[in-house]
Amino acid sequence: MEFPVDVALAELVSQLPTGPRWWYEVKLDGHRTVLWRLAETVRLQARSGRDVTTPWMDLAVAGMALPPGVVLDGEAVVVVDGQVSFEAAQARAASSPARSRELAARHPALLIVWDVLSLPTGDVRGRPYEERRALMLDMVAGLPEGSPIQAVSATEDVEVARVWYETLTGSGVEGVVAKSGRSPYRAGRSSSWKKVRHAETIDAEVVGFTGAAGRPRALAVRLPDGRVALSQRLGAQLAARVAAALVAVAPAAQGRAAGGESFTAAESGLLVEVLAGTTRHAVVTVTRVR
């Protein structure tokens, strides 16, 4: 396997699937993170493939306790006052090295792991989910006591999963992911992985911006139906995260959104989540950077 890896994604559905060999995992509100234990170091990657080792250095240090060759997939989360805080995770992801150390001292991160992609013996993505989960649990169990790398809660009982979905929202659980016990780890969106979530969002590709690259006011995003739409004004934390990617991209010619608004075109490779309910209009609401 070569860094970065294309991650597996779940299909958004309105109801949890039922039947033999379905497993259900808690879906926490954090940042998708893949941990690579290399021969002499640890690297972390975001869902987009970007290297995010620096802002999550406390997780990278914890990952050194794993044997070289292990690659784990999961969610980097930050707990504040007993609740998983997406805002705190966003602040950490957008922070400078000095600021990230300060934030980590105040609220250490956790890596909630749900899959293993590679072991010291080689790539295991082709094995069934049930086998990979057992291997992942063995890896996590071998870590020192108190490690921030922890296994996600999972069950084969759909009624337990429904209780999680209905009662744990206030603690930072944004939904439940269902996975077929037979399924391999396959890059991209798969019908053998399904998710139900409280806030329905979709992914969109950033293709431009308004304002300056270092201080973007809004984003031009390409929606799944091919339309390019301009987002609402970005908050300070979102703008800072996007700016870090945009300043490294040479701006192209002016573009024009479906509503007629002009923007500076820039193929950044960045993905963002937008509220699904707003995409019927020319203006969309960006909720986070993937």
Image: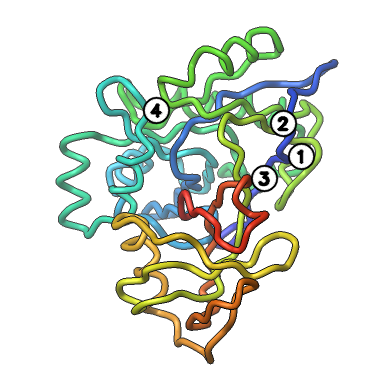
Q: Nearer the viewer, mark 4 or mark 3?
A: 3
Say whether residue 282 is left or right of residue 111: right
Structural crowding at the residue carrying mark 4, measured as other residues with C-alpha within 10 Å and reported as few (<14), some (14–19) or many (≥20) = some
Q: Looking at the image, is mark 1 or mark 4 earlier in the sequence?
A: 4
Local SS, label 1: loop
- Tell me if residue 214 comes above or below residue 205 in the rendering: below
Q: CA distance from mark 3 to mark 2?
A: 14 Å
Structural crowding at the residue carrying mark 1, measured as other residues with C-alpha within 10 Å and reported as few (<14), some (14–19) or many (≥20) = many
The residue furthest bottom is 253
Q: CA distance from mark 1 to mark 2?
A: 6 Å
Where does the image place residue 220, in percent across and percent down from the top left?
Answer: 53, 70
Residue 82 picture quarter: top left
Q: Are marks 1 and 2 in contact (CB under 8 Å)?
A: yes
Q: Which amino acid lies under the numbered mark 3 shown in the image of this protein?
A: Leu
**Residue highlighted by disc 2:** 129
Where does the image place residue 108, in percent across and percent down from the top left?
Answer: 25, 35
Q: Looking at the image, is mark 1 or mark 2 earlier in the sequence?
A: 2
- Tell me if residue 129 comes above or below residue 71 in the rendering: above
Residue at left 40%, top 61%? 233
Q: Looking at the image, is mark 1 or mark 3 earlier in the sequence?
A: 3
Q: Which amino acid lies under the numbered mark 4 shown in the image of this protein?
A: Leu
- Tell me if residue 117 comes above or below residue 138 in the rendering: below
